[in-house]
Image (tube, rainbow, N blue to C red):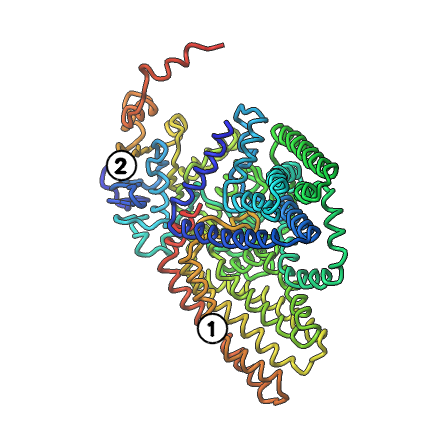
Amino acid sequence: MSAAPDPPALQITGLWKRFGEKIAVAGVDLTVPTGSFYGLVGPNGAGKTTTLSMATGLLRPDFGQVLVRGQDLWADPLRVKATLGVLPDGVRLFDRLTGAQLVTYSGLLRGLDRDTVRDRTADLLRTFDLADDADTLVVDYSAGMTKKVALACALVHAPRVLLLDEPFEAVDPVSAANIRDILSSYVAGGGTVVVSSHVMDLVQRMCDHVAVIAQGHVLAQGTTDEVRGSATLEDRFVELVGGRRTEGALSWLRTSSD
Amino acid sequence: MVAHLVRLKLTLLRNGLRSSVWKVVGLVLTGLYALFLVAMCVAGLVVLGTQDDVELRRTVVVLAGSLLVVGWWLLPLVAFGVDSTLDPERFRLFALRRRHLLTGLSLAGLVGVPGVATVLLGGASALAWWREPVALVAGVVGGALGVLLCVVGSRAVTTLLAPFISGRRFREVAAVLAIVPLILLGPILLGVTAGLATVADVLPDIAVVVGWTPVGAPWALAADVGAGAWGAAAGKVGISLATLVVLVAVWDRALAASFVRSEGGTSASHSGLGFFDRVPATPTGAVVARCLTYWLRDPRYAASVAVVPVMVLLLWFLGRGGSGVLGAGVLVAFVMGWSLSADISYDHTAFWTHLAAPVDGRVDRTGRAVAGLLVGGVAVLATDLVVLGVSGRWDATAPLLGMSLGVLAAGVGLSSVYSARVVYPVPKPGDNPFSTPQGNSFAVMLTQSLGMLLLLVVCAPTVGLGIAALLTDVVLLDVLTLAVGVGTGVAAVVVGIRTGARVYDRRAPELLQSIRSFA
């Protein structure tokens, strides 16, 4: 990266987090350039969710700094949070609200006026194919619909930086393609997106930048082409993370016993 | 296989205990308490065994045993979801023989304090015949049959009714309604005791009849053997065994059906934005609207509103229709004001929505407090109106309003600080509002007690003045109560929101982190 005049959309330096005995994140440094579509990949339990939680103000880091467009998140949380769109993973929503109420709630909480919230809520629900279920309680939504309505909540205030934890999990292929289009056009318009995912193929096609995280460390980061070199992202990922077993594993499985 | 299920239950229990020392303490205390009760019962049975009155022994053992069985059968319906660790639904993907599953689940049902206590009591029921060896043996057999009836019946009833009671709507409504008889337990017991006194003469006859029913038969076995009525005794064994067979068959069928049934429920539609259209379009207004919606839609909140009419009834009953009922409004105010102290705990991890948005403590605290004051205010005013009307003490209007509104506001103010500082495990969204969440510790109970104690101290001047005003005819006291009540209330809310907001701004991420650690 050449020295850019603008500060990066997200700069994480020396981030640490420990839960009891377990060190979930051990000195993570990440630089997400403005206008990039950034993929965060890693095996289960690598520290992706913990890193994203600390980068969005949901979890206080033990050490380290999070700069969003040059501003220190943990020094001035309210100001920085206003520019972030967040989709965390593994948390509940206020699911006794209807879909429309939930998106409205997110919009109002972020200080939008009533008309803007109403228009954008209708737009978002239509785009995510939830218009028919706008008046259904979110608790009665399917997993994929819940993901989509949460994404709508993350977008309603038109944030400058989007941090999405597993946005495609449980989402059907058509909706996933729609979401990809929305995110791509958002990036084209100058926004920055960070997504975490297990699906290497998706990240390779979608993201222009990527970071590989395992056991709380960043193993590689840069443009997707830099990181993967001549191999596919999946092969490169396996090479970096290790843990592939081919010889002698479950040999008995080959001999069917019928 | 059977041993596996029992071991699984034991492992679940042990791992649950491993996570916190306080849980071990809790279990030990519950165990000691149960042991104490069992010991009392055993002592009672031994004493009963010294009585020569055969009829008395039969009456006590049969009626108490039947109550035990009925309790096992019906309690899981009320307290649905209290113990779902071995929910048969979770085994649907395993290739298990149903026969093994049935035996394993029955035995696993006896692991735990209630199970062990029931086994002890079932065995001890024979002690009422400790002077007659043959009847004693019959008593042990009867006790074993009785315990089996308890466990198998309880599983059969829950499995059979699961499709009905697992629907979200039913569960929510039933859970809230179930609290009514529970709160009224005192008056009901009083009524029953009074009733019992009048029917004491026919109790032995009732026991004889109940002894022929499925719930009472095993408990009547020893009495029949003791009396030498071998035909009747054989009948009791027959009834018990037949009941067991029927219950196992029902359970088996229901279990088989549950394995092929798909999960799912009904969904309700709520058109429009509800409260969100009726509040100012500001972050604080949004929080108010969200909280109000939850007060109406979430059974955990609805439960505390449902308590209101019950409380009026209770005080009216205890006060024998006199002026004691006037206290209902103050009691409602206390309960509803303090119920706000669990607000963030009730959000569970959905609390991240506030944390991710640029919402500061002032917005969060004010929104929740305003919603609490609105709902609580309506409930308190309605209660006051009803009790004033019922008692005809319209002269007490001013002090009553002063007391109830003052207590409500003080509760809301104190809760605003408490809930920004302490989160604790509560029933999760969608759980039974009266289920006991895992991991509640004594540390939390201690802070809860301290908080309520502090609330009592803050309310004391108002309530003291109010009582004085109610008992005398001094107009000055009426005015003073109203003034002091409103004064302390407003002060508590303002100071509470300010302090709570400061605490919130400092600790909000830590609150979310501790909520996540409960999950």
**In front: label 1 or label 2:** 1
Residue named by callout 1: B492
Dot 2 lies on which element?
strand
CA–CA distance between discs 1 and 2? 49 Å
- Left or right: residue B451 versus residue B209 is left
Q: Where does the image place residue A203, in percent across and percent down from the top left?
A: 38, 30
For the question of whether residue B117 can be seen, the reply is yes
Along the viewing direction, whichever of A240 and B432 lies nearer the viewer: B432
Where is residue B325? Give x, y as percent: 66, 73
Q: Please tell me which residue is depicted at 31% across the width and 15% down the height of the picture.
A: A247
- The amino acid marked with disc number 2 is His
Q: Is residue B269 visible?
A: no
Indicate the quadrant containing the C terminus of chain B: top left, top right, bottom left or bottom right: top left
Q: Residue at x 58, y 84 (%)?
A: B468
In the image, residue B460 lies at what x, y percent?
50, 77
Callout 2 environment at 10 Å: few (<14), some (14 to 19), or many (20+)?
Answer: many
Residue A77 occupies which quadrant of the picture? bottom left
Q: Amino acid at mark 1?
A: Ala
Residue name at image x 60 percent, y 56 percent: B303
Q: Numbered disc 2: what chain?
A: A
Which residue occupies 56% across, 29% down? B101
Q: Which mark is residue A217?
A: 2
Give the crowd class for mark 1: few <14, some 14-19, many >=20 residues within 10 Å.
Answer: many
Disc 1 secondary structure class: helix
Q: Which mark is residue B93?
A: none
Q: Is residue B516 above or below residue A234?
A: below
Q: Are marks 1 and 2 in contact (CB under 8 Å)?
A: no
Residue A158 location (% of width, % of height):
45, 47
